[in-house]
Image: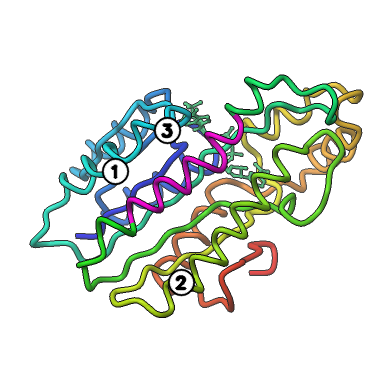
Amino acid sequence: MKYSIITGTSSGIGEAIARKLILDRQSIFCISRRLNESLTELALSVSGGLWYFETDLSELQKLPALMGEILNLTDSGNISSLTLVNNAATLDPVSAAGDYDIAALQQHFNVSLLAPLILSNEFIRLTRHLDIPKTIVNIGSGAASSPYAGWGPYCSSKAGLEMFTRTTNLEQKSVTNPVRIISVAPGIVDTPMQQKIRATSAGSFPMKERFQQLYQQNLLSRPADVAEKIAGIIDGRISCEGEIIDLRKI
Ligand SMILES: NC(=O)c1ccc[n+]([C@@H]2O[C@H](COP(=O)([O-])OP(=O)(O)OC[C@H]3O[C@@H](n4cnc5c(N)ncnc54)[C@H](OP(=O)(O)O)[C@@H]3O)[C@@H](O)[C@H]2O)c1
């Protein structure tokens, strides 16, 4: 049985990845604050395995136990692959340095950077003994390498996640039963996060108009297409060089 753990499955890209993997007959573990009933219904309709954890990823101290609980639910005698997709992230706070709300800043880095690092740490630690294909996919962004005014926290957490991917990739080259770790920038995708970007005030996000134009010109990718490509990269149907991947080039 192939097992995947996906964060941020209540909407957007995470929901699309979960949907794709359910239809591929994987057993999946979904994590978000809101339950996504359309996913539980889909899993039921194909008799697939789905466990939903309505969890706030900013509560970092709970995450090691969560990963332990998830891995305990796998059928240890019958695991053919294990994947962790660190997809959940938040844009807030959208404002310039000098105007940050400290609590919002802390919430941002908890969800968008520390939670992926903690989940990855536990995933690597608890699966060291397993000689099977193991993959961590961090959902990255062009914002990891291009600065956008108003997106200081978002650009910083994505840059941090990308560097974590690179350091861990280096470390895993010299261990037994390594984990493959990649960062995948999905391009501009038609999700609630994009709706939020278009609704931001131009004062706090000067590039807003550009994102509105892309939407009006119908240039956003569909979450289902992004999920299809990510699933192909995970299972090796789509081959790509290096650990930092830009989906727009695939
Ligand atoms: N859309 C784009 O154009 C684009 C471009 C580049 C990169 N990305 C990246 O793609 C990923 C998915 O984004 P999206 O566009 O699909 O956004 P989205 O529709 O806003 O989805 C974000 C997901 O993260 C979850 N999440 C947020 N805060 C959480 C928390 N405290 N605890 C648990 N889950 C939490 C949300 O679930 P709950 O609210 O239910 O908790 C939701 O399921 C993100 O990493 C984003 O940075 C998106």
Residue at numbered disc 3: 60
Quadrant (top left/top right/bottom left/bottom right) for the C terminus = bottom right
Check mark 3 vs ligand 1: CB closer than 8 Å? yes or no: no
Split into quadrants, the picture shows ligand 1 in the one at: top right
Q: Predominant secondary structure in magenta?
A: helix
Q: Amino acid at mark 3?
A: Leu
Q: Residues within 10 Å of mark 3 (few under 14, many from 20)?
A: some
Start and end of the magenta stretch?
108-123
Quadrant (top left/top right/bottom left/bottom right) for the N terminus = bottom left
Q: Amino acid at mark 1?
A: Met
Q: Quadrant of residue 124?
A: bottom left
Q: Is residue 156 left or right of residue 80?
A: right
Q: Are marks 2 and 1 in contact (CB under 8 Å)?
A: no
Residue at numbered disc 1: 67
Earlier-in-chain disc, 3 versus 2: 3
Q: Which sits in the foreground, 34 or 131?
A: 131
Whole-Å distance between the Cαs marked 1 and 3? Answer: 12 Å
Whole-Å distance between the Cαs marked 3 and 2? Answer: 24 Å
Q: Is residue 100 left or right of residue 40?
A: right
Q: Amino acid at mark 2?
A: Glu
Which residue sits at x=85%, y=29%?
96
Give x and y (percent) for residue 51. Answer: 25, 37
Which residue sits at x=56%, y=76%?
240
Give x and y (percent) for residue 3. Answer: 27, 54
Q: Is residue 219 above or below residue 208?
A: below
Which residue sits at x=56%, y=54%?
226
Q: Which numbered dot is residue 171?
A: 2
